[in-house]
Image: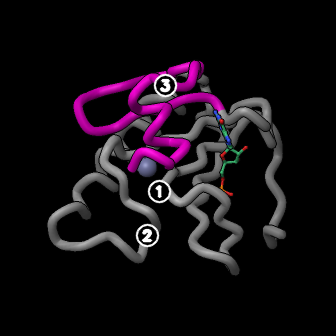
Amino acid sequence: MSDCLFCKIVNQEIPTNIIAENENVLAFNDINPQAPVHVLIIPKEHIPTTLDLNENNYQVLSEMGKMANEISKDFELQEGYRWVVNTNKYGGQAVYHIHLHLLGGRQMSWPPG
Ligand code: 5GP
Ligand code: ZN
């Protein structure tokens, strides 16, 4: 998707602070961090929302989770952290390329806004 911001990051068209990368998944710092650690983990494939997951691409979620776990250990977040995935308008999704927010380094509150 040529007009997708996160596809541009995957294609290195936008300079980004890459945290981790493998064949299918990329992790980078959020440009507007909401916690001391705020990393976005995305599939390299363009999947707009969680509603677009299907039998052919569900497995990328486990790859994203695996990378998030590795990063949480790198950043010593064993005391706790939060994963967030926003979907569509009511979910507060702003970028329509699936991303897992890994937030940590401070006490989180509940319920979320
Ligand atoms: P959403 O609301 O879609 O779940 O989250 C989108 C996230 O992308 C936001 O936390 C926002 O700060 C982040 N973001 C938006 N534009 C950029 C960008 O150009 N670079 C990076 N690294 N993050 C971005
Ligand atoms: Zn995309």
- Is the CB atom of the residue marked by disc 3 within 8 angstroms of ligand 1's nearest atom? no
Distance Cα–Cα, label 3 vs label 2: 25 Å
Q: Which one is earlier in the sequence, the residue at label 1 or at label 3?
A: 3
**Residue that carries the numbered disc 3 in the rendered image:** 13
* Marks 2 and 1 close (CB-CB < 8 Å): yes
In the displayed structure, 45 sits above or below 51; it is above
Residue at figure coordinates x 47%, y 56% from the top left: 98
Q: Position of residue 87 (x, y in %)?
A: 57, 71
Which quarter of the rendered image does ligand 1 occupy?
A: top right
Neighbor class of circle 3 (other Cα within 10 Å; few <14, some 14-19, many 20+) is few
Residue occupied by mark 2:
50
The segment highlighted magenta reads 1-29
Residue type at the position of mark 2: Thr
Label ID, residue 98: 1
In primary-sequence order, the first of circles 2 and 1 is: 2
Residue 105, position as x, y percentages in the image: 75, 34
